[in-house]
Amino acid sequence: MIPAPALAAWLSRLVQIPSVTPVQAGPKALAHGPAGEARLAERLAEWFQQFGGQVTVEEVQPGRPSVYALWSGRTDRWAALDVHTDTVGVEQMDDDPFSGAIRDGRVWGRGAVDTKASLAIALALLEEMDRRGIQPEPNLLIGATVDEEFGATGAPAFAAWIQRQGLVIHQLMVAEPTGCVPVHGHKGVARFELTVHGEAAHTSQPERGKNAVVAAARIVLAYQAEHERLQTLPPTALGRANLTVAQIQGGTGINVVPDRCRLGVDRRVLDGESPSHLIDELYALAQSATPLPVEIQRLREMDAFLQPPDAPWIRQLAAWSGHQPAVAPYGTNAWAYKDLPGETVVMGPGSIDQAHAAQEWVAIDQLEKMAGIYARWWGLAEDGAAA
Ligand SMILES: [Zn+2]
């Protein structure tokens, strides 16, 4: 239905509108204008309106608007797409991060695969539907959501909006680069920081102080033992849980007993586990590892996402894509929709291997393949016919 050059052109246009998540926007990103999703959101609102959508803009955080757009369908069915508009930073990128260059059968630049590719496909189809005066088969809701890469506030805001509108979504796709594989599950995450408080002293008289780094080391070893214990448990549908102490900072000088040490901890969460409860338990474990006071700051709590691989829509997507349903090792916005009825899947063109990388690109044939799947999903192409 949509020729490859049109898909690539839409994606190129989107890559050229920077939308770097603010905490990762360094000098290279800021040379191209302000951080955040606002510029992209403004253009999306215009395009969605132009293509007949009923548009709502929700400022999820100051200066960071999500854009929701609705199209009426020919049936009572509701289909929704969550596509995040933010990208990771560009400081580590080699060439022009926002070139949107089209060459070697690929579209290049930050966000090309994660995840403006899905947005480009949706826009190309919406433009074509508008031009030809075609209504989608399902009622269609597109949420172009902010803040997926860092804080994860966009998807819960979209889920809450859907509930406030009283909408019952039957099929919800979370756009991420899965290589067009329908992903029916992934782990959640529990992240927190610990600060161990000791007492400073001169290192010539260490007995006068309390060494926060040594206390933190005991916590690190206790957590590593817990990680190793988790690896001995039988694997679940989502594999095994992991516990990683990912960051450590402490000490003020080489001749000072450190009075403070900070740890950054990441626990991957399985289906049925409560991130909040896990953090409570790990905090208790840290406190039992050292007599020094330990302070906690909770950073992120995301449930795992898992639904049966044989749910009807997932089976349909598997048939259309030619890929068996799979689980993913990384997290996505899908956790935010667990309280909504209906099926949720994570799916999109291109490979996660190119996401967040120094060079980001997506293959144009992946765009074509996913556009064909969207066309079937939205009832724009007969099953089995060329999209
Ligand atoms: Zn993404």
Image (spheres, helix red, strand yellow):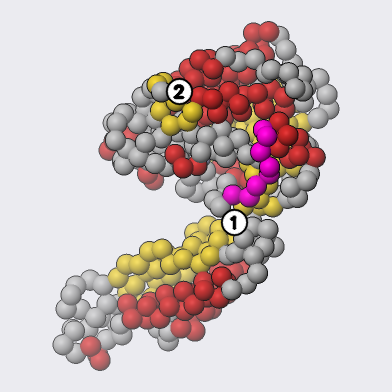
Up-down relation of residue 371 to residue 343 (above or below): above
Query: In the drawing, what numbered circle is on residue 362?
Result: none
Up-down relation of residue 10 to residue 323 (above or below): above
Which of the two marks, 1 or 2, is nearer to us in this view? 2
Say if disc 2 is inside 8 Å of ligand 1.
Answer: no
Give me the C-alpha separation between circle 1 and circle 2.
Answer: 34 Å
- The location of residue 33, given as percent across then percent down, is 34, 29
Name which of mark 1 and mark 2 comes first in the sequence.
2
Residue at position x 70%, y 49% in the image: 338
At label 1, counting other C-alpha atoms closer than 10 Å, the crowd grade (few under 14, some 14-19, many 20 or more) is many
Question: Which residue is labeled 1 in the image?
Answer: 188
What is the three-letter code of the residue carrying label 2?
Answer: Gly
Question: Which residue is labeled 2 in the image?
Answer: 105
Quarter-wise, where is residue 259 in the image? bottom left
Up-down relation of residue 383 to residue 31 (above or below): above
Residue at position x 29%, y 35% in the image: 94
Q: Note whether residue 17 is visible.
A: no
- The location of residue 386, given as percent across then percent down, is 69, 17
Q: Note whether residue 383 is visible.
A: yes
Residue at position x 83%, y 27% in the image: 76
What is the three-letter code of the residue carrying label 1?
Answer: Gly
Magenta range is: 321-328
Q: Nearer the viewer, residue 288 or 356?
A: 356
- Looking at the rendered image, the quarter that the N terminus falls into is top right
- Check if residue 335 falls in the magenta segment: no
State the SS at label 2.
loop
Q: Residue furthest front?
A: 322
Q: Nearer the viewer, residue 185 or 90?
A: 185
Answer left or right for 126 relative to 363. Answer: right
Q: Nearer the viewer, residue 212 or 368?
A: 368
